[in-house]
């Protein structure tokens, strides 16, 4: 058994713990320093693993990617994108009239399509295996096309628990196990837009700071023949693990860099050529390749959003209307 197998076996067979989870990681992808720091800082027992061993394992996987650049050059350009079956059109229409879809996909040409999972380009290098297993159980092994569509584009509420605490007169903290927790926006509300509030006096306006979850739709970005997975990594992994080859996705089409900057995450915006021009970028199927994947046992993480505000009062001279 080589060093990679020993490490992977040790990570998988560690005693289960209430506050631990298993993550599958892609090795060999930059940045190396971030990966080494992550393993040593957060992995259970990670500080006992030498940095040299981490780098050696990463280097072996990186060499394998160089081999794939030759043997699978252009594979990402052959992702199959099929038309959505007509039977699913009513479900797609229902999603498109939902406010979450209208707010999230209002900038670029967008359509629904059946997208091949294996050849999806990926920018996220890890997946929570425990969550993926829960998703597989929820969907089942032989879902109908309708069940598959609803799984990929749920319109129900977020099922992740959310906790909120006031930690000061002007500070609030939100936390959840879901990495999809995010700050939405700040907006001004009219008094008639809220109910149940007993005011000190007449209300002139309400400043709202909105925290919640993302639209949670499985969506991809297509540029020429390449398709990059933007949201829904755990569902895409679960589907592929169940043997499903194509999934109904929301497809946003980009034709230039400025459009990509509207749709893509930070990593993709910073290195667009790596994901859309490299001979062999990381693909979803790589999560299932033992030569470039490893399983780490890490502590569960609570994602937190802290919101604070400041109110000031001023007196100003009234100079009357501008002339």
Image (spheres, rainbow, N blue to C red):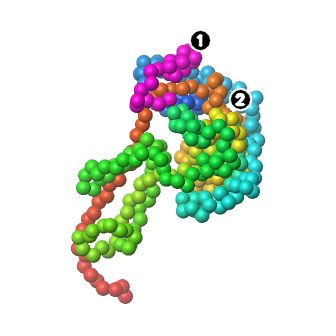
Q: Is residue 310 above or below residue 229?
A: below
Examine the rendering and report whether any part of residue 123 can be seen.
no
* Coordinates of residue 162 in the picture (x, y in percent): 40, 47
* 1 left or right, relative to 41: right
* Coordinates of residue 58 in the picture (x, y in percent): 57, 24
Q: Report the quarter where the N terminus lies.
A: top right
* 103 left or right, relative to 320: right
In this view, the residue in front, 62 or 109, is: 109
**Front tag of 1 and 2:** 1
Q: Earlier in the sequence, mark 1 or mark 2?
A: 1
Element class at badge 1: loop
Residue 248 lies in magenta, yes or no? no
Q: Which mark is residue 68?
A: 2
Q: CA distance from mark 1 to mark 2?
A: 24 Å
Q: For residue 104, which quarter of the picture?
A: bottom right
**What is the residue that sits farthest to the top in this orientation?**
1
Q: Which residues are magenta?
A: 1-22
Give the residue at x 42% y 37%. 301
Give the residue at x 54% y 26%. 295
In this view, the residue in front, 125 or 34, is: 125
In this view, the residue in front, 186 or 92, is: 92
Residue on which disc 1 sits:
1
Residue 6 lies in magenta, yes or no? yes
* Coordinates of residue 3 in the picture (x, y in percent): 56, 15
Give the residue at x 71% y 26%. 67
Label 1: how many residues lie within 10 Å, few (<14), some (14-19) or many (20+)? few
* Coordinates of residue 41 in the picture (x, y in percent): 41, 28
Q: Is residue 125 above or below residue 218?
A: above
* 5 left or right, relative to 198: right
**What is the residue that sits farthest to the bottom in this orientation?**
323
């Amino acid at each position: 058994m080589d060093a990679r197998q020993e490490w992977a076996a040790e990570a998988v067979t560690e005693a289960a713990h209430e506050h631990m989870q298993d993550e599958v990681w892609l090795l060999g992808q930059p940045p190396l320093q971030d990966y080494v720091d992550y393993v040593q800082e957060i992995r259970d027992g990670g500080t006992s693993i030498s940095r040299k061993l981490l780098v050696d394992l990463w280097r072996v996987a990186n060499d394998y990617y160089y081999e794939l650049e030759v043997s699978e050059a252009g594979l990402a350009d052959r992702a199959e994108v099929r038309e959505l079956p007509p039977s699913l059109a009513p479900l797609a229409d229902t999603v498109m009239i939902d406010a979450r879809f209208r707010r999230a996909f209002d900038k670029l040409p967008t359509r629904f399509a059946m997208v091949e999972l294996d050849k999806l380009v990926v920018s996220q290098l890890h997946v929570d295996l425990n969550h993926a297993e829960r998703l597989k159980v929820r969907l089942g092994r032989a879902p109908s096309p309708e069940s598959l569509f609803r799984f990929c584009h749920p319109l129900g509420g977020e099922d992740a628990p959310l906790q909120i605490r006031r930690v000061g007169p002007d500070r609030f903290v939100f936390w959840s196990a879901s990495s999809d927790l995010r700050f939405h926006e700040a907006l001004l509300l009219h008094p008639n837009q809220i109910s149940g509030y007993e005011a000190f006096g007449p209300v002139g306006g309400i400043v709202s700071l909105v925290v919640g979850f993302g639209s949670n739709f499985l969506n991809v970005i297509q540029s020429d023949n390449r398709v990059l997975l933007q949201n829904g990594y755990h569902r895409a992994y679960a589907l592929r693990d169940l043997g499903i080859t194509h999934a109904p996705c929301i497809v946003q089409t980009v034709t230039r860099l400025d459009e990509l900057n509207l749709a893509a995450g930070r990593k993709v915006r910073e290195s667009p050529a790596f994901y859309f021009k490299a001979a062999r970028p990381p693909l979803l199927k790589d999560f299932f390749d033992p030569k470039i994947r490893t399983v780490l046992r890490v502590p569960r993480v609570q994602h937190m959003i802290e919101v604070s505000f400041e109110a000031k009062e001023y007196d100003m001279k009234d100079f009357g209307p501008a002339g």
